[in-house]
Image: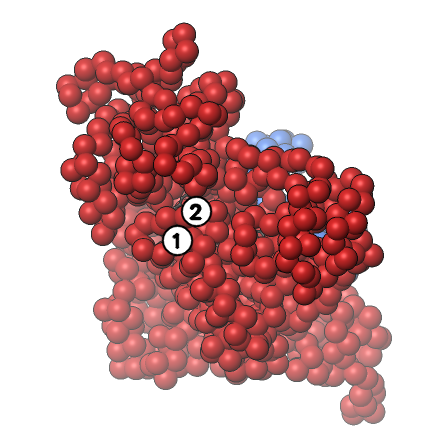
Amino acid sequence: MEAGKVNNSPKILVFSTEKISDPAIDMAGLLKLHYPPTVYTIPVPCSSAVKPKWILHALEQGFDGVFIAADGTDCPYGESCTEKTAQVMTATQQLMKDKGIDPARLKMAAICSVCSEPFVKHVKSFTEYLKKPSN
Amino acid sequence: MKKKIGVYICHCGGNISDYVDVEQVRKAVENEPGVFLAKTTMFACADSNQKEMVEDIAAQHLDGVVVASCSPKLHLITFRAVTERAGLNKYNYVHANIREQVSWAHSDNKPGATEKAIRIVKSAIAKVNRSESLEPVKVSATKAVAVIGAGVAGMRAAIELAEAGSEVYLIEREHFVGGRVAQFDDLCVSTETGKTLVTRLYDEVMKHKHVTLFTGAEVIETSGSVGNFNLKVKVVPRYIELRCKEHQLQDAIDVCPVQVPDEFNFNITMRKAIYHNYPSEYPQLPAIDIKNCTRCGECEKVCENINFDQKTEYLNLKVGSILLATGFDPYEPKRGEFGYGEIENVVTLPQFKRIMHYSKDKLMYRGKQIKHIAYIYCVGSRQVDGENKYCSRYCCTATIHSAVTAKNKFKDIYNYHFNRGIRTYGKQEVLYDESSRKGDIYLQSFEDAPPVVEKKGDKTIVKITDILTNNKELEVEADLVVLVTGMVPRKENSIAGLLKVPKGRDNFFNEIHMKLRPVETVIDGITIAGASQGPKNIMESMNSALSAATKSFSIVNAGELALEPTVAKIDKENCEWCGKCDEACPYSAFTKIEYNGKFIAEVNETICKGCGMCLPVCDTNAIELIGFTDKEVESMIDALV
Ligand SMILES: Cc1cc2nc3c(=O)[nH]c(=O)nc-3n(C[C@H](O)[C@H](O)[C@H](O)COP(=O)(O)OP(=O)(O)OC[C@H]3O[C@@H](n4cnc5c(N)ncnc54)[C@H](O)[C@@H]3O)c2cc1C
């Protein structure tokens, strides 16, 4: 994105998880909780499986932001998920800094299988953040 | 890369095409690399379309298929089966979710929705271009099912499961079985009373050696997943030993000085701290309500089998599937809602049923004889302002049935039904007819002008602008006002939180799809039955119980489950064993092996669960997850951007 220019419809890539956060995102649709259509989802088995390489690829190819809809403590693969997803975040944000990318363009929040409203809130506020010219 | 991909874009009747221009989507993707044919279809899941897909795949030798329709949670399996039927390995099928995540989510922005749908379909095409034929992974499944709740639904399910050949743990929170049905005498549309029905089911449950019933029991911790759930169950003691002398028990109840409102009678009567809900209730042993017991010791003096040394027990159970049948609560009207809690002769339908139970020749409440009864329908259901938008289904019939029963049982009963349109669906219509013939009076209004209950002196008046008599203002002087309260989800419903079972708009447990997958939840291995899923009468609860039992049984029956072949794969050339994958793996699926003069990691495919936790930790990027390879994910990203 060019500095100083307002981006009215920033694109966000969401890494959701098949068992936990993707059902919540589906339910947001079912409940007609609207959010910007520039939010796209790729479901993966677990949020701690997201490679930093994929996130960088998305940002470099033109996504304005990447949001990890993490399993949190509900992860069917065990408790270490929260910590490991956090490690993915830290490692990727370091790589982003090295490349001169604003680390705040990567966000993460735990989205449980019924967290439709929190999901919508997160992607809306993230969209607002990414709209600001300085970001 | 594929050469012959078939793409099918679904209208879903209008659920998708009302917001997404499906023809525009079709045009936008028909020339994508590898796409051989692109069609739109009214209902992709319809038999006719499935047949057409099978023909296309077989006749045109398609090597990849994409359907853009609802969530994969609904139809991924359906369309994988279609490709299999046509002789194509099912992992060459990719599903694009353009309903839940597009048309519904963005029904406020049609151009935006169409644009998003195009990109999602393109990314599915990108993924299928790189898909490979695979075989599912097998894991063992425990051949046991936990049924939570021993109401009519839970007991029916337990019997069915045991008969099919599964081990069953039937877990009931109360000390007695039967749920709500035990609270009602006469039932519609049945000649059996609630108690005889509960007794019959209980006897059948106890007959099966493969059913273990726990009462006073509750699941407090869960772990594991489909095929192998671990449950920690807390069992609270009754403080009374088995095989107690019956007269001593009655003596113990008689001497207990504690008096608390009896929830079984919806608080219209009091009970002791040592109690059973009715004589001959199952299991036939009273229990001590330890929260209200003062430990005065009076009962111990008259009954030698009281034992306060009994301890709370904790059990660990392993099951392959969990069936939830936790039922409902009756709606509790707010104070002042149609005079409830303020005018003394305003009661709820469940209370009315208990009042009838306790009346002998004359219908009595608070020492007064009841003759004129006003029933106000849809209290807590079909709310305009409140949260309960739904119809509770059972109540029209149960009310008319109660009114007719009152008329048959007691003298001089006059029934006035203040309704919003009677919904005695199916055979229950006969009852409506009977009540009308017996002279019951029906008065009706719309939701914007409900009846009003007022106290005038010592009289209780119900007023309505009756649409059946051309908006005449009518009023009835009632001895008793019965609020026909609907069903709401259980107040104490922590089990839902433990198992992360999603709730629907009505706050009851939510199935994946009302018609297509009516007893399954998005949590694999957890099924739902009875009124826990939404308002149901007994027959409907039993039917859903049979259905859920069959589903749960099909999960555990084979002793083995076919899981996604999503496992980690090592790039042998790039791997330089560092051990980080081994550290990250929660299942110890990695071993260190020698390969071409160096050490590398090897994946044990039967242990690997496909979580992918090992992927990001590999410094040389030598691990890929099948189905989520760099090529697949990055090509999807490229198509979405
Ligand atoms: C006033 C009234 C009259 C009715 N009359 C009729 C009628 O005449 N005919 C008819 O067909 N239907 C009637 N119904 C409907 C009928 O009551 C329901 O269809 C039926 O009770 C549903 O059964 P269930 O097993 O799903 O739920 P429930 O009866 O609610 O049973 C659920 C059981 O699960 C237990 N439980 C709950 N949570 C847990 C937990 N976490 N762990 C363990 N156990 C738990 C409960 O203690 C309970 O025993 C009536 C309903 C009302 C309110």
Does A55 appear above or below B424? below
The letter of the blue chain is A
Total label count? Answer: 2
Q: Are marks 2 and 1 in contact (CB under 8 Å)?
A: yes
Q: Position of residue B211 (x, y in %)?
A: 57, 72
Read off the residue under disc 1. B193
Q: CA distance from mark 2 to mark 1?
A: 7 Å
Q: Quadrant of the N terminus of chain A?
A: top right
**In-image side of B175 versus B513 (left or right):** right
Q: Residue at x 30, y 52 (%)?
A: B189
Circle 2: is it few (<14), some (14-19), or many (20+) Cα within 10 Å? some
Viewer-proximal residue among B37 and A117:
A117
| Three-letter code, disc 1 | Thr
Q: Residue at x 67, y 65 (%)?
A: B243
Coloring applied to the structure: by chain
Q: Is residue A128 visible?
A: yes
Viewer-proximal residue among B272 and B319:
B272
Does B561 appear above or below B358? below
Viewer-proximal residue among A126 and B194:
B194
Viewer-proximal residue among B168 and B457:
B457
The numbered disc on residue B158 is none
Q: Position of residue A97 (x, y in %)?
A: 77, 47
The letter of the red chain is B
Q: Secondary structure at mark 2?
A: loop
The numbered disc on residue B184 is 2
Does B73 appear above or below B443? below
Q: Position of residue B443 (x, y in %)?
A: 23, 26
**Which residue is farthest top?**
B457
Q: Residue at x 57, y 76 (%)?
A: B210
